[in-house]
C-alpha cells in the first residue's frame, strides 16, 4: 500500500542518528546551508549534503536558492515533536533487536538447569 | 498524522527456544533492554526494568504464550504504575523459519500517552519556530512585491 510505504520511508529517513541530529540542528537554526550544518556536526559537508538529499526526498526538509547558496529548512508540517519522538522509539527498538540477535547468536555457555 | 504504533522485525540465526529465553528471562532482558530486570512471567505478573542512570520503570505482563508470544505494558515516567494514559503495549512475537527465528515487535498506544511537560514545551517551541518561518516567508514575499 502506498500510504504504508510512504510512512516506512519517512521512518527510515528519521531513524538514522545523524539525520536526527541534522534535524535538531536545522530546528535550532531555522534555516541553514549544508556548510553551516557541517559546522555543528562531526561529519563532512558532503555527508551532510547526502543526508539532506534523503530528508528532501521524503519531504522533511525543503531547500531554496539564496544568491549563490542553497538554504535548507524543515517542513514543520511533516515533522512534529510526536513524530520525532516515535522515530526515536523505533531507533531504540532497532538497537534492542540487534542486541537480542547478538545474545541469541552468541554461543555462550548454556546456563545450568 | 502521528502513527500510534511502531513495528520492527529481525531474523535471528538461532532456534526459537533460544530466542524465547533471551526475550523473556530477566538475566537476558537486563542486557538488551535495561541494566537489570525482574519479571514475574505470567499474565498480570509484575516486571521492573532498571537503568543504573535513569531509575526503574514498571510493567505489567499481559500475555505469555511460549515460545511464540509475549506482551507487556510499561509505564513512563520511571516509577509510575502502568495505567491508561501513561503506558504503551509491547508485543513480541516469534516464529521459526527453518533454522532461524523471525522476531517481530509492535509497540502501540502512543496517541494515548500523556506527554511529560518538557516534551510539550519542546513541541510548543517547534510550533513557534514553524510560525516564525512562515512569517519570514510572508515578509519576504511582501518585500518582493514592493520592490
Image: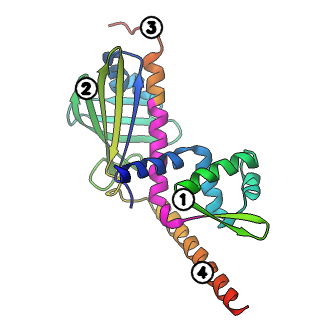
Mark identifier at residue A60: 1
Query: Mark 1 falls on what kind of element?
Result: loop
Q: Quadrant of the C terminus of chain A?
A: top left
Chain to which the residue tagged by mark 4 belongs: B
Q: Earlier in the sequence, mark 3 or mark 1?
A: 1
Give the spatial CA distance, label 2 vs label 4: 54 Å
Q: Which residue is mark 2?
A: B68
**Residue B115 found in image quarter:** bottom left
Query: Mark 3 falls on what kind of element?
Result: loop
Q: Is residue B9 left or right of residue A84?
A: left
Q: Say whether residue A11 is magenta.
A: no
Residue B146's place in the image compared with A83, above or below, is below
Give the spatial CA distance, label 3 vs label 4: 63 Å
- Say which of A53 and A24 sits in front: A53
Q: Residue at x 25, y 22 (%)?
A: B67
Q: Are marks 3 and 1 in contact (CB under 8 Å)?
A: no
Q: Nearer the viewer, mark 1 or mark 4?
A: 1
Give the spatial CA distance, label 2 vs label 3: 24 Å
The magenta stretch spans which residues?
Answer: A74-97
Give the spatial CA distance, label 1 vs label 4: 19 Å
- Say which of A26 and A70 sits in front: A70
Chain to which the residue tagged by mark 1 belongs: A
Q: Which residue is mark 3?
A: A109
Q: Residues within 10 Å of mark 2 (few under 14, many from 20)?
A: some
Residue A81's place in the image compared with B12, above or below, is below
Q: Which residue is mark 4?
A: B135
Chain to which the residue tagged by mark 3 belongs: A
- Residue furthest to the front: A2
Amino acid at each position: 500500500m502506498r500510504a504504508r510505504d510512504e510512512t516506512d520511508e519517512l521512518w527510515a529517513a528519521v531513524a538514522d542518528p545523524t539525520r536526527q541530529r541534522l534535524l535538531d540542528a536545522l530546528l535550532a537554526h531555522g534555516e541553514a546551508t549544508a556548510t553551516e550544518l557541517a559546522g555543528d556536526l562531526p561529519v563532512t559537508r558532503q555527508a551532510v549534503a547526502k543526508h539532506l538529499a534523503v530528508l528532501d526526498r521524503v519531504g522533511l526538509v525543503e531547500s531554496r536558492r539564496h544568491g549563490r547558496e542553497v538554504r535548507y529548512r524543515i517542513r514543520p508540517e511533516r515533522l512534529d515533536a510526536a513524530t520525532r519522538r516515535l522515530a526515536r522509539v523505533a531507533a531504540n527498538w532497532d538497537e534492542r533487536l540487534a542486541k537480542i540477535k547478538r545474545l541469541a547468536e552468541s554461543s555462550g555457555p548454556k546456563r545450568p538447569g | 498524522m502521528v502513527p500510534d504504533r511502531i513495528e520492527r522485525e529481525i531474523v535471528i540465526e538461532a532456534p526459537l527456544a533460544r530466542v524465547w529465553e533471551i526475550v523473556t528471562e530477566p538475566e537476558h532482558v537486563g542486557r538488551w533492554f535495561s541494566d537489570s530486570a525482574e519479571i514475574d512471567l505470567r499474565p498480570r505478573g509484575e516486571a521492573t526494568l532498571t537503568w543504573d542512570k535513569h531509575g526503574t520503570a514498571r510493567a505489567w505482563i499481559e500475555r505469555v504464550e511460549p515460545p511464540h508470544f509475549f506482551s507487556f505494558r510499561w509505564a513512563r515516567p520511571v516509577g509510575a504504575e502502568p495505567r491508561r494514559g501513561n503506558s504503551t503495549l509491547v508485543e513480541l512475537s516469534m516464529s521459526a523459519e527453518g533454522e532461524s527465528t523471525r522476531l517481530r515487535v509492535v509497540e502501540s498506544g502512543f496517541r494515548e500517552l500523556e506527554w511529560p511537560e518538557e516534551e510539550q514545551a519542546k513541541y510548543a517551541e517547534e510550533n513557534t519556530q514553524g510560525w516564525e518561518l512562515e512569517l519570514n516567508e510572508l515578509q519576504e514575499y511582501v518585500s518582493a512585491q514592493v520592490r
